Image (tube, rainbow, N blue to C red):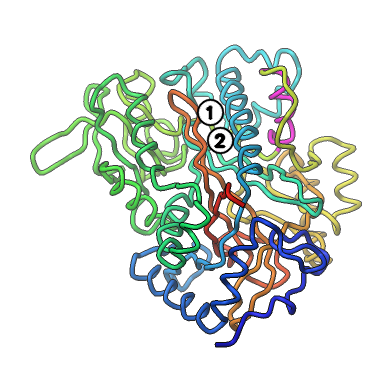
Amino acid sequence: MARINIENYETEGFFDETFESDKTVKPHYKYFADRLQKMGIKRLNLLQHSTDRVQMSLGMTFNVYSDNQGIERILHLDIIPRIVTGKDWDYLEKGLKQRIYAMNLFLDDIYNDQKILKDKVIPKELILSSSTYLKQCIGFKPPKGVWVHITGTDIIRGGDGGYYVLEDNLRCPSGVSYMLENREILKRTFPEIFEKLAVRPVANYTHSLRDMLESLSPVSPASIAVLTPGIYNSAYFEHAYLAQQMGAELVEGRDLVVKDDIVYKITTKGLKRVDVIYRRVDDDFIDPEVFRSDSLLGTPGLFRAYLKGNVVLVNAPGTGVADDKAVYAYVPDIIKYYLGEEMILPNVQTYICNRPDDQKFVIENIADLVVKQTDASGGYGMLIGPKSTKAEQEEFVQKIKKNPRNYIAQPTINLSRVPTLTEDGTIEGRHVDLRPYVLYGNEIKVTPGALTRVALKKGSLVVNSSQGGGSKDTWVVDNI
């Protein structure tokens, strides 16, 4: 059987999570690398092929809206896991808890007393001009004061090996179902290795999610529903998966009706009250009476029932303002203001194009920067300077000048790399990021694992599934 020759692996000057620059295997990867070499490349490719088939049979697919062919794709799972030390994970967990707690206090403040705006820690116009700031939520306090119940924070490792928060996803973070299913597949793929390394478990996530949702309602047991836009949504697999795993109802807006400000599900046996809704529908579409009148995805009267305390919406409407990429630049100040602490997990340096000096710098250096639209996601509305053409750069310059509030820029960061099985059956380094999932009910819980997204295209820094990225299972290990 042909052995895997790691001598051919090149780090190419990037921070590699498995190998040192001299190709020495890092301690936390050594056992896995040894087993991998004994396994052989042919066996590894057979396992990868089997994994692809399992994903398709499980229905682990998604749609890409920009793809006119309308073809369902699997979120390709590369079977070489990303391994994180327990020490590193404990640091990440501490930083995430600090960040989520402060962001929740921030949301509660800007919809109520607005102290942080009155104290001019953040420009008032920056918040009030955000397209995701909901004036309808002013003066409202959600159950238990929690706005952000479910978070998927995007974290990267830079060339120095340090961890940085790249984005906060506080509205409807996706991908957790792939984290859970990836783990089940990898446990069957490498059972002996998995057991030997005593990988921290993630399987109880859906139980914790259900417990968190129930904790928000005064009714026990609470009736829980997952609100989906429907089968054509790119993340429909996840919506159905989470509902099934939690024993919750999977509903579309048309399946619900509001009577006397109480939400009911329409069933063949009549109306059944719903107490908690884990919504996977954006704010603008949840209630045509209040937001977009042309929305067919929501339910008339749903927001009114929410404001009257007759149903809980998770995450709370209005959280998107904390997702705004311009607000992201102020998170260190937000943590300092509310907690009196320095930020544990640092941000990436960010230039806000609404600031004249920052805008001038961005325009003059656009070929070297990553420019992002503040209200976009999924890898859209973005320019990667070093990979762009002069025409694309000029297009973004004009966009920035026309609407500076809508753009920020960051240095191009060489994301860390992890060995990945390529299409031609060899192992090469590919860039990755990390999306841990955090639940906030009675307390903040960070699941000890994450969705690692990987840029499958050689040299690419874009890991988003909608842009051709794949995934890896993330193993948190202590016994190294």
* Residue 134, label in figure: 1
| Residue found 23% across the figure and 22% down from its top | 260
Towards the viewer: 190 or 378: 190
Q: In this rendered view, identify the residue nearer to me: 318 or 294.
A: 318
Residue 192, above or below 350? below
Q: Position of residue 422 (x, y in %)?
A: 61, 77
Q: Quadrant of residue 292?
A: top left
Q: For the point 82% across and 59% down, which residue is it?
A: 394
- Name the main secondary structure of what is drawn in magenta: helix
Q: Indicate yes or no whether the magenta region holds residue 334.
A: yes
Question: Circle 1 — which element?
Answer: loop
* Residue behind mark 2: 320
| Residue stretch in magenta | 326-338
Direction left: furthest residue = 269
Q: Nearer the viewer, mark 1 or mark 2?
A: 2
Of helix, strand and loop, which one carries label 2?
helix
In the picture shown, does residue 103 fall above or below 157?
above
